[in-house]
Amino acid sequence: MNGIFEKHMKQYDYIFTGAGLSALMTVYKMVVSGKFQNKRILLLDENTKQTNDRTWCFWSENKSIWGPSISKKWDSALFANADFQRRLELRPYQYNKIQGLDFYNQVLELIAKQKNIDFVQEKVVEIEESESIVLVKTETQSFSCSQLFNSIYNPSLAANQSKYPLLQQHFVGWFIQTEAPVFNREQATFMDFSVEQKGNTRFMYVLPISETEALLEYTLFSKELLSKKEYETEIENYIHKLGIRQYQILEKEAGTIPMTCYPFWKHNTQNAINIGTAGGWTKASTGYTFKNADKKSSQLVSFLETQTDFRKLYKKTKFWWYDLLLLDILDQKNETGAAIFSALFQKGNPQLIFKFLDEETSFWEDLQVIWKCPKGLFITALLKRLFHF
């Protein structure tokens, strides 16, 4: 084992390498289930999760176990492009906002009360697997476990292949406070494609907290990242377009999320599973993470209650194919994103669209959504993909 096995190595039933959204969701649900109290669990991450480092949003029609972390809800949303605006009535759905720190606090407060769970703040440097045991090494310690949950993303897996396109959802956000009231606190701006597209899929995303406070994010679905200055210039232009003259920036955030249908699950083994972004848990066609991770973590916890071979967990669905076709289009014609989403939202039923994006629609409902999209683009993509496979 290359000398990694030490006499005093700490042994666990489950080790989570990386304590991001998906790992924390999974452990939280393991605790809530009450069925893993006799299992020793270790979370390894170099980050203490004590800063407000990101914002997540998701829509739901029922109460969520993450309710204590939700800081704002909206019953309506705005979709816009250069030619039209549409107010989307979301009910029975609500659009929910969660601040990273609130989520971390909800999860870590529960975990801190569990005698069978440890959180170690260290960077993972090596993972080694044999038939019956997985060994994990940090910069100063070594641990062993029966089963490993890895959420440390390996970007080369999707980047070093050509069968599945790879785009990024990348963004910079400013949380600002204005002197004069300007925002409609009851309506989130879901996508505003009225910004200059510049050959890409680019939109603004606005989450108003009050009439004078909002998070504004400049977001792209594209292959290449921009310079920091370009994102911020576009945010400044949008603020000016809203008629805002006096404001201050309270916080900033930035991120990039891979959008790909690459089959990360094929790298799972009997005793080690990739979760979160590392496991392809992000919704490939939109970059939405929270709702997908919520569903996948519940499936994983249910699986753990009865089974142990991680290779049996994944099941490819029709939605994987839908996502793949959209990514094929955006990969070849990135500038068509605004037209595709506009066609979807201009006359489509918002509740049905959200149900479709949640992967809960019947095939007949799928057709009602897909039929709104530019048919030529998708037929061409389908024929190319069938030939490609």
Image (tube, rainbow, N blue to C red):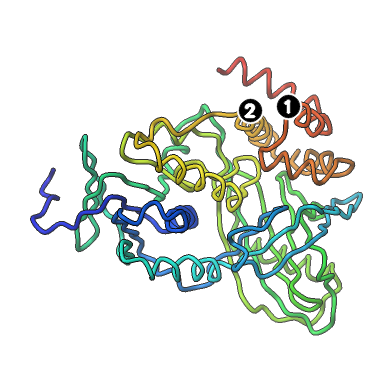
The C terminus lies in quadrant: top right
Q: Are marks 2 and 1 in contact (CB under 8 Å)?
A: yes
State the image quarter where residue 132 is shown: top left
What is the CA distance from the residue labelled 2 to the residue labelled 1? 9 Å
> Residue 287, percent across and down?
61, 47
Q: Is residue 186 left or right of residue 285?
A: right
Q: Residues within 10 Å of mark 1 (few under 14, many from 20)?
A: few
Please give the name of the residue rendered at 47% of the width and 38% of the height, measured from the top-left corner: 159
Which residue is labeled 1 in the image?
Answer: 363
Determine the residue located farthest toward the front in the rendered image: 34
Q: In the figure, is residue 295 to the left or right of 59?
A: left
Q: Quadrant of the N terminus?
A: top left
The residue most toward the top is 387
Asked if 329 appears above or below 276 in the picture, the reply is: above
Residue reaching furthest to the left: 7
- Could you tell me which secondary element the residue under label 1 belongs to? helix
Q: x%, y% of residue 88?
A: 85, 53
Mark 2 lies on a secondary structure that is helix
Q: Which residue is mark 2?
A: 318
- Residue 46 horizontal/vertical position (percent): 35, 64
